[in-house]
């Protein structure tokens, strides 16, 4: 067995060539080939995983910039493989909880093989009957993000009016469906007619609109929410957030998941009506999915149940091969993807 012999094998990887300011380009990254050893050091609790899928997520943009003050996640290291969530198969292990052949997901490299020094940060995959790619999305970090952010931070009640921005993305499509399962009225915005159609026909949103076709976001929100918004699931920031604040109901909740409209700006846009938070007694709360990892297996069972019962459906956009990784990642910021964007490194 290769893992026992500790064979060295070629290891294709996507590296960051330079730190980025403004809008990133494919040329900021490079696909190179190094080597990997399919063994762990004697006595080490590490494991080696063969990466099957890696996830493209908007927060990766922040890691491509050199921060003077440390960010909430470390900057990428120039010349080393990008790091993000992925799905893999254990090839070698010195850890008692992980055996060769186990299927796992966790923070791995954008490469064919990754040495994981602390396997306890990984999760075992309990439902291999689903596409393994789902563990970069609906059964992985984005799914847990939607579940925790909407249900725990948003605290929905039956009959609530819910607005979701970036609603066809990895998290937004799930927030909308969880809102419907809770008995809420849900409106989603997206950036193309194709995505808007998907929200209604596949994900069951009550109403949807293409924000790029709306000259006045405030007027659009008044049209869809004549009585105001109870919960706004925030994914974009900027002018959308400003328009939403004017349309919130008293005691509304705003779980702040991300602000993708701001990630490539050298100077973030301001929000000029924050006094609405006071006047309407709003609760606007940021959250991190890492804080909910201790509830992951509870979430996995719940979401697997919804998928089996057909109560939740999921759309993925899969780029084939690490060579397509840089283009897939950059495409997140122009809205090129439809559904959850990921990269297939090797099909199992």
Image: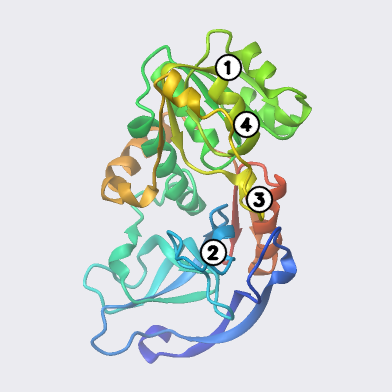
Report crowding for label 4: few under 14, some 14 to 19, many 20 or more residues within 10 A (C-alpha).
many
* Alpha-carbon span between mark 2 and mark 4: 24 Å
Task: State left or right for residue 51 relative to residue 193.
Answer: left
- Which is nearer the N-term, disc 3 or disc 1? 1
Marks 1 and 2 close (CB-CB < 8 Å): no
Query: Callout 4: helix, strand or loop?
Result: helix
Mark 2 element type: helix
Quadrant of res 121: bottom left
Write down the quadrant of residue 306 in the picture. Answer: top left
* C-alpha distance separating marks 3 and 1: 25 Å
The residue nearer to you, when weighing 232 against 128, is 232
Q: Check disc 3: other Cα within 10 Å, few if <14, some if 14-19, many if 20+.
A: some
Q: How far apart are marks 3 and 2 (CA)?
A: 15 Å
Q: Image quadrant for the N terminus?
A: bottom left
Determine the residue positioned at 66% across, 56% down: 266
Q: Nearer the viewer, mark 3 or mark 1?
A: 3
Local SS, label 3: helix
In the rendered structure, find residue 63 and report the number of the disc placed on it.
2
At 64% across and 68% down in the image, what residue appears?
A: 322
Residue under label 3, please give it: 332
Please tell me in which quadrant of the rendered image residue 82 appears: bottom right
Q: Which of marks 4 and 1 is nearer the N terminus?
A: 1
Can the viewer see residue 101 in this picture?
yes
């Amino acid at each position: 067995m290769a893992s026992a012999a500790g064979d060295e094998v070629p290891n294709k990887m996507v590296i960051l060539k330079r730190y980025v300011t403004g809008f990133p380009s494919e040329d900021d990254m490079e696909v190179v080939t190094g080597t990997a050893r399919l063994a762990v050091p004697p006595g080490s609790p590490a494991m080696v995983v063969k990466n099957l899928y890696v996830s493209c997520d908007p927060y990766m943009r922040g890691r491509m910039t050199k921060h003077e003050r440390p960010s909430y996640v470390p900057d990428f290291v120039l010349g080393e493989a990008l790091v993000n969530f992925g799905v893999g198969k254990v090839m070698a292990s010195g850890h008692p909880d992980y055996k060769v052949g186990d299927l796992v997901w966790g923070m791995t490299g954008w490469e064919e093989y990754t040495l994981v020094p602390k396997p306890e940060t990984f999760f075992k995959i309990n439902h291999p009957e689903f596409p393994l790619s789902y563990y970069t999305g609906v059964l992985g970090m984005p799914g847990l993000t939607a579940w925790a952010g909407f249900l725990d931070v948003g605290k929905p009640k039956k009959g609530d009016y819910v607005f979701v921005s970036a609603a066809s993305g990895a998290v937004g499509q799930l927030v909308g469906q969880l809102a419907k399962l809770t008995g809420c009225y849900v409106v989603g915005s997206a950036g193309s007619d194709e995505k808007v159609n998907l929200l209604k026909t596949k994900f069951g949103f009550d109403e949807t609109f293409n924000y790029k076709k709306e000259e006045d976001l405030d007027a659009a929100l008044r049209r869809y929410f004549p009585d105001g918004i109870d919960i706004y699931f925030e994914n974009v920031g900027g002018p959308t957030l400003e328009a939403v604040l004017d349309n919130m109901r008293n005691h509304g909740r705003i779980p702040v998941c991300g602000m993708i409209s701001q990630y490539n700006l050298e100077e973030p846009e301001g929000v000029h009506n924050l006094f609405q938070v006071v006047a309407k007694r709003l609760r606007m709360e940021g959250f991190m999915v890492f804080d909910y990892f201790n509830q992951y297996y509870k979430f996995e069972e719940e979401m697997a149940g919804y998928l089996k019962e057909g109560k939740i459906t999921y759309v993925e956009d899969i780029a084939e091969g690490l060579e397509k990784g840089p283009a897939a990642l950059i495409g997140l910021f122009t809205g090129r993807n439809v559904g959850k964007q990921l990269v297939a490194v090797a099909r199992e």
